[in-house]
Amino acid sequence: MARTNSIPQAFQILLLLAGFAGPLGVQAATAPAAPFIRSERHDFRVVTVVQGLQNPWSMAFLPGGDALITERPGRLRILRGGRLLRDPVPGVPKVRTGDQGGLLDVVPHPDFARNRLIYLSYSKPNADDSRGTTAVLRARFENDRLEDVREILEAKAWAEGRGHYGSRMAFDRNGYLFITIGDRQVLPFGDLQAQLAHPAQQLGTHQGKVLRLHDDGRVPADNPFVNTPNALPEIWSYGHRSLQGLAVHPQTNEVWESEHGPQGGDEVNLIRAGRNYGWPVIGYGVSYGAGAPIHSSIAREGMEMPVHFWVPSIAVSGMMIYSGDRFPGWKGDLFSGGMHWENRVLSRVTLKGDRVTSQEMLLQKAYRIRDVRQGPDGYIYLVTDDRAGGLSPILRLEPAN
């Protein structure tokens, strides 16, 4: 169990605004020295990096010290020298806002220093905004604006609803781009045959899938369903629900993914080519409200079980696998944000190969964490979100000593 300080953790967090200017040039807000938070392997402080963001969703660090931040209402912001520039980046397309939709993930190309390419995912509206899907664009970030904007993916996941877009992105070390697409909230109820007919189980749609592309949107020739009749060739894995986290392991190059279960049953999965991850046939959650059963069972032959799951749910969000030197005792651990109103948390999960050996809950009930990123300085950055649309900060974890 985590060690406890004599000062309650939630009260400590309200005080943690110690000033610091790291190698990134990201200047934290200045305030008197504050108590630190104790945890199993590291004592740390929470420092405010920048404030005044509306529904921030993701953050990406660029060579040279800048960072890009997406705001779900459709704005791409620049953090430069510790200051949030007033004007959003021009060139962002129209997005379908409302509920879970809007401007979502931002990821730089692995060779950004040479080609200046960035990738944005967003909820794309149809002509009259009656339906939407997940889309991904690629653009050059030049002179603080987007140029040569080109859509590289329009997911075959159109729906009237405004939820479960997925849209996390990550590059592996071979330069392949992985993209998550949610199931678009298609109801899962019914017998086994109805569950097997759910779009997440069907290879003719992108709903409930992880996709794999070249950096220009082309389909790799060795994707698992390229030669499968009636299957979409972009699909890498299937049987997913609401995919909220995606990370490539810095040592093994394995792809890890997290997703919301319904009421209970949030998951962490190790993603393998062509595998079926079971939604809605297997799982640990129940229906909202009454808690009626959804799944046929918790396991089924030919379907992958999660490496780790949370019951009750924490409402998983963005995640990363730590590889820095600021917190050596956390190296190789998986960090996931939690957004559930009762279980707001930063979950630290210790991995050993394809197994989870322990978990520690940090910052319990302190913040609604939308994304977790490791900075080039080795610190851990948290993108926080106010569900009601109020302004939110980005925070940084720093060692206490």
Image (cartoon, helix red, strand yellow):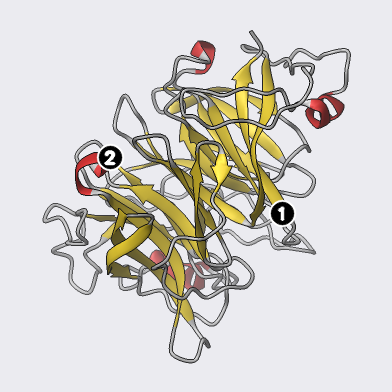
Could you tell me the amino acid type at mark 2?
A: Asp
Query: Residue 155 appears at what percent x and percent y?
Result: 35, 71
Callout 1 secondary element: strand
Quarter holding the C terminus is: top right
Report x, y in % for residue 318: 53, 45
Tell me if 214 is positioned left or right of 143 in this view: left
Look at the picture and state if 87 lies above or below 161: above
Dot 1: few (<14), some (14–19), or many (≥20) neighbours within 10 Å? some
Q: Position of residue 118 (x, y in %)?
A: 32, 53
Quadrant location of the N terminus in the rendered image: top right
Residue located at (31% from left, 24% from top): 251
376 to the left or right of 341: left
Determine the image quadrant of residue 360.
top right
Q: Closest to the observer: 267 or 165?
A: 165
- Mark sitting on residue 172: 2
Q: Which residue type carries mark 1?
A: Leu
Q: Along the line of sight, which residue is nearer the eye, 200 or 28?
A: 28
Look at mark 1 in the image and give the residue it sits on.
391
Specify few, some or many for label 2: CA neighbours under 10 Å numbering under 14, 14-19, or 20 or more: some
Query: Residue 74 vs residue 31: left or right?
Result: left
Residue at image position (60%, 71%) is: 189
Nearest-to-viewer mark from 1 and 2 = 1
**Label 1 vs 2, first from the N-terminus:** 2
Left/right placement of residue 270 relative to residue 183 reads left
Q: Residue at x 21, y 43 (%)?
A: 175
Q: Give residue 18's position: percent from left, percent from top.
A: 71, 22
Give residue 57's mark. Answer: none
Q: Residue furthest top?
A: 401
Distance between mark 1 and mark 2 Cα atoms = 33 Å
